[in-house]
Amino acid sequence: METLTTQLSKEQKLEKLNRILEKANNLNSTNCLEPEFLDWKTLVHRTLVKIFGEASIEVKEFKKLTFRAAILELIPYDPKAMLNENQFNNDFSTAKRLIKQLIEDFNSEIEIPLLSENNLPKIEWNGTQKELAELFIELKRKGWVSEIEGNLIQNYFSGAKTIKQILKEGGANYEQVYTKTYKPKFDTIKFKEK
């Protein structure tokens, strides 16, 4: 059931909640055994499970509503008292308030766009690309990172458009970084103690 909860859009969830609320408003039942009410109750349960999942607080709260008087309170047992209209009306009103609250929650929910590679915030790098490459090379050599991932560096640091080529083209010795004119800046990083 959990996979179904992630497949519905916010609009689809709102549509389903509005539909069960509309059906509740059009319901003329006065007790929990009427077929029209039983159909609605089943629809609400299935809808809440589909939207929130079987183990959700929303489903648990709905299941707490009995729509009838508790058997243990009735001594001696009276089947007519089981269909207590006040209890039915109270629980039915509570169910409608629950659905209205869920609709309000969805309507007030702010959707936060997922971060993609194109809109990730970047770490401002104030050095050169060779210095950035050297930093990661030295971190790897000294045991602070296990791999150098050029794509990640490019995605997370500003001014790193060609970092993948700089790291790749120099081979194992990183000749693109360690040229005759380049003075290392990070070679004094100490080895990672184990």
Image (cartoon, rainbow, N blue to C red):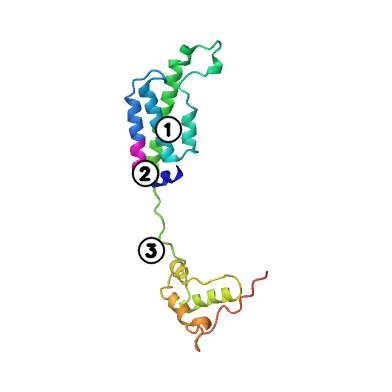
Whether residue 19 is visible: yes
Left/right of residue 145 with respect to residue 156 in the rendered view: right
| Res. 45 mark | 1
Which quarter of the figure is the C terminus placed in?
A: bottom right
Find the distance from the CA under tag 2 to the CA under tag 3. Answer: 24 Å
Amino acid beneath label 2 = Lys
Out of 41 and 58, give the one closest to the viewer.
Answer: 41
- Residue receiving disc 3: 118
Find the distance from the CA under tag 2 to the CA under tag 1. Answer: 18 Å
The percent coordinates of residue 121 (x first, y second) are 43, 62
Secondary structure type for disc 3: loop
Out of 192 and 180, give the one closest to the viewer.
Answer: 192
* Residue density around tag 2, few if under 14, some if 14–19, many if 20 or more, within 10 Å: some
Find the distance from the CA under tag 3 to the CA under tag 1. Answer: 41 Å
Q: The magenta stretch spans which residues?
A: 8-16
Secondary structure type for disc 1: helix
Q: Nearer the viewer, mark 3 or mark 1?
A: 1
Residue under the point 35% across and 23% down: 36
User: Compared to 60, does 183 lie above or below?
Assistant: below
The percent coordinates of residue 30 (x first, y second) are 38, 18
- Residue receiving disc 2: 10
Residue under the point 43% across and 78% down: 165
Where on the picture, by quarter, is residue 104? top left
